Structure formats: structure tokens, C-alpha cells
Image: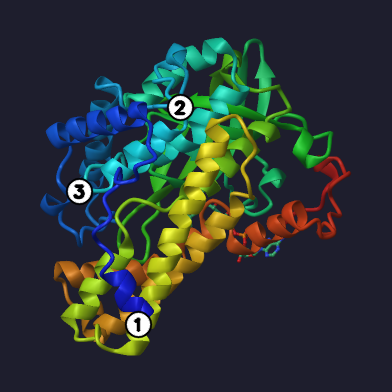
């Protein structure tokens, strides 16, 4: 049997069939199943061709709030922050709890959407770098979706070179006064709070003069301007900050030492993007191939097999990282690797979807055509968001392979003396 067909028809494995699970794990799985069957939407009831980019603002907000409501349900029933400390509203479960819950959830269509991404980025960062007061104030409302967050990192002149950022924060009494501009801030138009990087000491090299601040998005002086994309939706915004005052106790980590917390966000973002799991896109590709008569074509089957194998590998890599981190160990390999892999898979998926559906799909307005268009237009989003593939490969070369560092002409120069346009 050709590899593609063998994999496509491998649908009989049920999570939990593995007889090596301990009685505690078996009981946990049963309890997760019973919670999910009572509260989650069965995948069959969710439109499989649904896309998350909506040209209509109200629909986009409704989708965002739908995710928030699911996060609230998870928290209400004790299924959010499974491995976080109970002190901060978590469940204090062992690392395997997250894996089992995500295996059980994959049969359902409910998910936290973008809220899940911010929990994955900000939660571990606050746990590792924030004071007890900041953790106690922000972690429970992050976890139950009551407060939605956005990431205020990138700037018009600082994306890949994030540490070169120019947004200034100056201490005035017990408040920071922030002026500058951020860009590409996902879901900023729906967020209640933002986590922000600002330059607080321009007299030292760029990585050393940055402070990590938490800002209430309703603060006077914040203007959020949604950016309309090629597909008509506004996934991200520009955020302008003019004289925004942030209480000094909303700093995460050391003043001027925010780069450490920023790196924790970036590492968790890369791991989250590359984690795999969830609804496999290959299912839709297989349906698309069946619809257009391509399932018998060995070239299509081979490409489907590649996507399916990559999805499965990504899920396993993601599980290994999550399991290590939750057990207090270093990731077994650089999380950037999973993101590079996920980015490559997304491009393969978009290309195959376009070829299977043909040009007609790109002009129609039916749900399948909309899905194909979203896959094509968005196929490079993961290659850019959360750090570009080129930059991730640089990081992998330096951090994992020990290759010589990129020449950094501005690494030891005070930020204010670095030439910039
Ligand atoms: C879907 C999506 C969501 C995003 N969400 C957010 C968000 O919520 N918050 C936020 O702050 N930002 C967000 N971003 C912004 C994202 O982090 C930046 O777009 C990304 O870091 C790249 O920065 P840039 O766009 O300025 O490109 P640039 O840094 O200008 O890069 C341009 C090109 O040059 C290449 N390049 C740059 N430096 C190097 C190098 N040293 N070696 C080799 N090649 C290099 C890059 O790979 C790229 O191809 C998002 C982006 C996307 C696409």
C-alpha cells in the first residue's frame, strides 16, 4: 500500500488506547472526556471550512469573543492552566495532563482562539519574571479570559531587529510615560491589556536598555488603528502611544532588563506556533483532493503524505518541548525548530490547496473557496509572525549548531549612537 494511502486511512487510533497509562492518567482522561462531552462543541457541528480571518469586524469580534467564552468555561470547570501553580489559579497537574487534555480536545471544535496564544506567551513569562503581586493580579484573569492581551513588540523600524526598538518610556515619579508606535499587533483592537517593550535607557547597548511593561489598553494616549489586509480582514493594528502613563509597579523583570522577559515571550511564541495538534489541515486537503478527483493521483498522494507526516511530527515535537518545560527541564531542542517546520508546512499546504482547487476557487464565494483563498493568502503568515524563518534559522545556527554569530556592528554601541533611518 502506498505510504500516502496508509497514512490517510490511519484513523482508528484512539488516544488512551495506550495500555501504559497509569491509573491516575486513565482517570484524568475519563474526567476530561466527560467534561468535553458536556461542554465542548463536537467537531462535526463546527463548519470544517471555517476561516479565522473575517472581512467583517463584527464577525471577527464575535469569533474572538467565542474563544474568550470557551476559555472562561475551561477556567470555571478547572481545565485552564492545568500545570500552573494553584496559587495563580492553575491546576498544579503534572506535565502529562496538558497532553492528555489536548488529545481529548482534538475531537472537538471548541478552542480559545487568539486568547490561547497570549496565554501561552504571557503566562510562562509572568510566572518566570514577574513579582508575586503582578502574578497574583494578572494570572487569574489571563487564565479565565476576563482580560484579553495583545503583544506590543514590533515597530516600523524594529521587527527582526526587535532590540533596536525606539518607543521611549521615561520615569516620572511613580509612573512611566510612554511615547512611540507599535505595529502588526494581533487582535489589539479587541485587547483589554498589552505587554509592551519600551526603551528606558538609550545610553547603553540596545539589549540592555529595554523595560517590559504591562499597559491597560484603555489608558489615555493609546490609539489603536486596525490595518486592513489583502483578504479584507484586520487581524492586526498599529498602536500609537502618546504620553501614556503606566504605574511603575507594572514592570515585569528588572527595569532596563526587560530583554530577558521578551526572550521568554518569543521562545514560548515560537513553541506555540510550531506546537502542532488541533484540527489537522491535512484533513481539509484530503477532502479537497477527494472533491476534485485528485485522491487517486500518486503525485497528490505523495504531497498529502508529506503534509500529514509533518503535522504528526510537529505534534510530537511540540509534546516533547511542553513536557520538558513543564517538568522544569530545558527544551530537548530549540523551539525555533518547530516554528520553522510549521512555517514550511503552511506554505506546502497553501500551495497544494491552490493547485487542488484550481483558479475557480480563488474567485468564488462559497465556504470551500473562502478556505482555499485564506490558505493561499495566509500561507506565509507563520513564516513572518513570531520571528521570520530567516531569523529563526540564524538563531538555530548560532544557538543550536554553535556556528559563528552574525556580525553585530551595534552590539556594543550605546543605542542612541547607532545610525538609523
Ligand atoms: C501574522 C502575524 C502576526 C503578528 N503579530 C504580532 C503581534 O501580535 N505583536 C507584534 O509586536 N508583532 C507581530 N507581528 C510582527 C512580526 O513579529 C514581524 O513582522 C516580524 O518580526 C518581522 O519583522 P518585520 O515585519 O519588521 O520584517 P523585517 O525585520 O524588516 O524583515 C524583512 C525581511 O528581511 C529578513 N531579515 C531581517 N533580518 C535578517 C537577518 N538578520 N538575517 C536574514 N534575514 C533577515 C526577514 O527574514 C524578512 O524576510 C506579526 C506578524 C505577522 C505576520
Labels 3, 1: front one: 1
Classify mark 1: helix, strand or loop. Answer: loop
On the image, numbered disc 2 is attached to which residue? 94
The location of residue 72, given as percent across then percent down, is 26, 27
Residue 28 location (% of width, % of height): 30, 28
Colouring rule applied to residues: rainbow
Q: Position of residue 327 (x, y in %)?
A: 56, 30
**Quadrant assignment, res 192:** top left
Q: Residues within 10 Å of mark 1 (few under 14, many from 20)?
A: few
Distance from disc 2 to disc 1, alpha carbons, whole Å, reads 39 Å
Residue for badge 1: 2
180 displayed left or right of 188: right
Q: Report the residue at 42% width, 53% height from top.
A: 276
**Figure quadrant of residue 352:** bottom left
What number is the disc on residue 59? 3
Inter-mark Cα distance, 3 to 2: 37 Å
Amino acid at each position: 500500500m502506498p505510504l500516502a494511502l496508509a497514512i490517510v486511512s490511519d484513523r482508528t487510533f484512539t488516544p488512551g488506547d495506550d495500555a501504559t497509562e497509569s491509573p491516575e492518567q486513565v482517570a484524568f482522561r475519563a474526567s476530561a472526556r466527560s467534561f468535553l462531552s458536556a461542554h465542548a462543541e463536537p467537531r462535526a457541528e463546527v463548519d470544517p471550512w471555517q476561516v479565522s480571518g473575517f472581512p467583517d469586524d463584527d464577525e471577527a469580534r464575535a469569533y474572538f469573543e467565542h474563544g474568550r467564552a470557551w476559555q472562561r468555561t475551561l477556567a470555571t470547570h478547572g481545565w485552564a492552566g492545568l500545570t500552573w501553580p494553584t496559587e495563580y489559579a492553575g491546576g498544579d497537574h503534572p506535565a502529562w495532563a496538558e497532553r492528555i487534555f489536548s488529545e481529548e480536545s482534538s475531537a472537538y471544535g471548541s478552542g480559545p482562539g487568539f486568547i490561547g496564544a497570549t496565554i501561552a506567551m504571557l503566562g510562562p513569562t509572568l510566572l518566570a519574571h514577574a513579582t508575586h503581586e503582578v502574578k497574583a493580579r494578572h494570572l487569574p484573569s489571563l487564565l479565565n479570559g476576563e482580560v484579553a492581551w495583545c503583544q506590543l513588540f514590533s515597530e516600523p523600524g524594529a521587527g527582526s531587529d526587535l532590540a533596536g526598538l525606539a518607543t521611549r518610556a521615561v520615569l516620572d515619579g511613580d509612573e512611566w510615560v510612554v511615547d512611540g508606535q507599535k505595529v502588526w499587533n494581533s487582535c489589539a483592537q479587541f485587547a483589554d491589556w498589552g505587554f509592551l517593550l519600551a526603551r528606558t535607557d538609550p545610553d547603553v547597548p540596545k539589549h540592555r536598555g529595554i523595560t517590559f511593561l504591562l499597559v491597560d489598553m484603555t489608558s489615555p494616549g493609546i490609539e489603536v488603528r486596525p490595518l486592513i489586509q489583502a483578504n479584507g480582514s484586520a487581524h492586526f493594528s498599529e498602536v500609537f502611544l502618546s504620553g501614556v502613563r503606566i504605574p511603575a509597579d507594572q514592570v515585569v523583570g528588572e527595569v532596563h532588563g526587560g530583554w530577558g522577559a521578551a526572550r521568554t515571550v518569543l521562545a514560548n511564541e515560537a513553541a506555540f506556533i510550531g506546537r502542532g495538534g488541533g484540527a489537522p489541515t491535512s484533513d481539509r486537503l484530503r477532502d479537497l483532493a477527494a472533491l476534485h478527483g485528485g485522491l487517486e493521483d500518486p503525485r497528490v498522494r505523495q504531497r498529502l503524505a508529506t503534509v500529514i507526516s509533518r503535522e504528526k511530527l510537529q505534534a510530537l515535537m511540540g509534546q516533547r518541548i511542553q513536557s520538558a518545560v513543564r517538568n522544569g527541564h530545558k527544551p530537548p531542542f530549540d523551539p525555533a525548530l518547530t516554528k520553522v517546520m510549521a512555517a514550511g508546512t503552511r506554505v506546502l499546504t497553501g500551495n497544494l490547496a491552490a493547485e487542488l482547487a484550481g483558479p475557480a476557487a480563488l474567485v468564488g464565494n462559497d465556504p470551500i473557496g473562502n478556505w482555499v483563498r485564506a490558505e493561499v493568502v495566509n500561507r506565509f503568515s507563520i513564516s513572518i509572525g513570531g520571528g521570520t524563518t530567516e531569523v529563526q534559522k540564524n538563531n538555530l545556527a548560532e544557538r543550536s549548531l554553535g556556528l559563528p554569530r552574525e556580525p553585530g556592528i551595534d552590539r556594543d554601541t550605546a543605542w542612541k549612537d547607532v545610525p538609523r533611518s
